[in-house]
Amino acid sequence: MTVVGGPSITETLERLAPGTPMRRALERIIQQGKGSLVVMGDGAEVSEASSGGFSLRSAVFSPARLAELSKMDGGIVLDDSWSNILEAGVHFIPDGAIPTDETGARHRTAERMAAQTGKPVVAVSEGRKVATLFYGGQKIELASPTEVAAHVNQELQSLDRLRSRLDDAELKLTRLEAAGLATYRSAITVLQRAELLERLGRVVEARALTLGEEGRIVYLQLNDLLAGVDFTKRAVLRDYIKPPRNSTIRQAMEDLSGMTANDLEDPSRVGKEMGFPDIDDPADPRGYRLLSQVGRLPDPVRDDIIRHFGTASSLLDARVDELLSVEGVGETRAGQLRAFFDRLQDTADEWEPVLD
């Protein structure tokens, strides 16, 4: 998420990663057993929500200097580049009408200051000995690398299990489509698991950002686990939503990502949001996802094939001469497609007793 006129949450977390000057400053504050409130940026919005304190001249930022100033009552204001400490001992007075779920006074103030000023704000808890970033509507604890790594490892294991469940659901959908037995429920299962996987992936990504260089290996694992997930969601929606216009697909993607966790777990609710009929009604997809499994098939040719045949069932039953009538499909490609469809149907035939 990017705050208008400010750095993204990703850029901010990278500047707060272990080993960076600002993170060393926060660790010093924690080691001192003190609490602190640091507004990481200046401007009219910050001045309007500030009272008292004193201005500093030529106070170049350093971890030691910030830690020493935090021993005083009141908060600290840095410039937007975090290169200079502008004020110390400041009493922050953000709008009390700004909603917050925080219970501690320091953290309530930090959340409201972040919301009101659009600046990153870090609160260091004296009791819990942890720094928390408030920015862009998010709250992220800057836990120790050891704690973060433990959480990340657990979440990567959960991601791996979710990815296996998604792959299983997609394989089942492929076989059902090839057998002509697909329902909207089977498509919804793929959408649910894909969305859950991406949501957990975003949580892991945010944690990995707080690890700095140590998080690089996490990104590699995360990219592997999330590879093709967004494409799968879009392909399923293009297959099952009618009419499959780009605007309709975009809206469906937004609706899916905006669903609460409880609603996402309910297949009927997901189906309603996607505009599907009864989720157990038979469905005849258009075949986008099936054709995406054919190697070296250009997108324009795939789209022409879909327009020509209309449904996956018609496509799977197409003869070679019918495939040849589609522009861009020559004898070699027609034979390749027919062989692919035959393999799909043979696999589905072998699987049908299990379906029964």
Image (cartoon, rainbow, N blue to C red):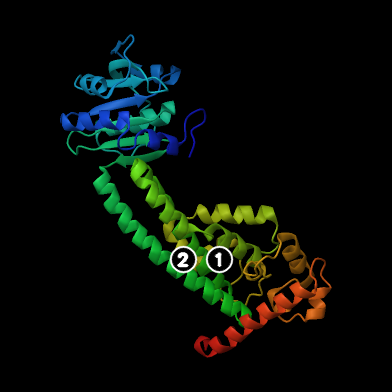
Q: Is residue 95 left or right of residue 223?
A: left
The residue that label 2 is drawn on is 266
**Which sits in the foreground, 57 or 97?**
57
Of the numbered discs 2 and 1, the one sitting upstream in the chain is 2
The residue that label 1 is drawn on is 271
Q: Secondary structure at mark 2?
A: loop
**Which sits in the foreground, 346 or 92?**
346
In the image, residue 108 sits, relative to residue 224, either above or below, namely above
Within-10-Å neighbours for mark 2: few <14, some 14–19, many 20+: few
Residue 330 horizontal/vertical position (percent): 80, 71
In the image, residue 351 sits, relative to residue 283, either above or below, namely below
Residue shown at the point (36%, 62%) measured from the top left: 158
Query: What's the residue type where badge 2 is placed?
Result: Asp
Residue lying at the far top of the rendered structure? 57
Residue shown at the point (61%, 86%) measured from the top left: 346
Within-10-Å neighbours for mark 1: few <14, some 14–19, many 20+: some
Q: Is residue 62 left or right of residue 237?
A: left
Residue shown at the point (32%, 32%) measured from the top left: 20
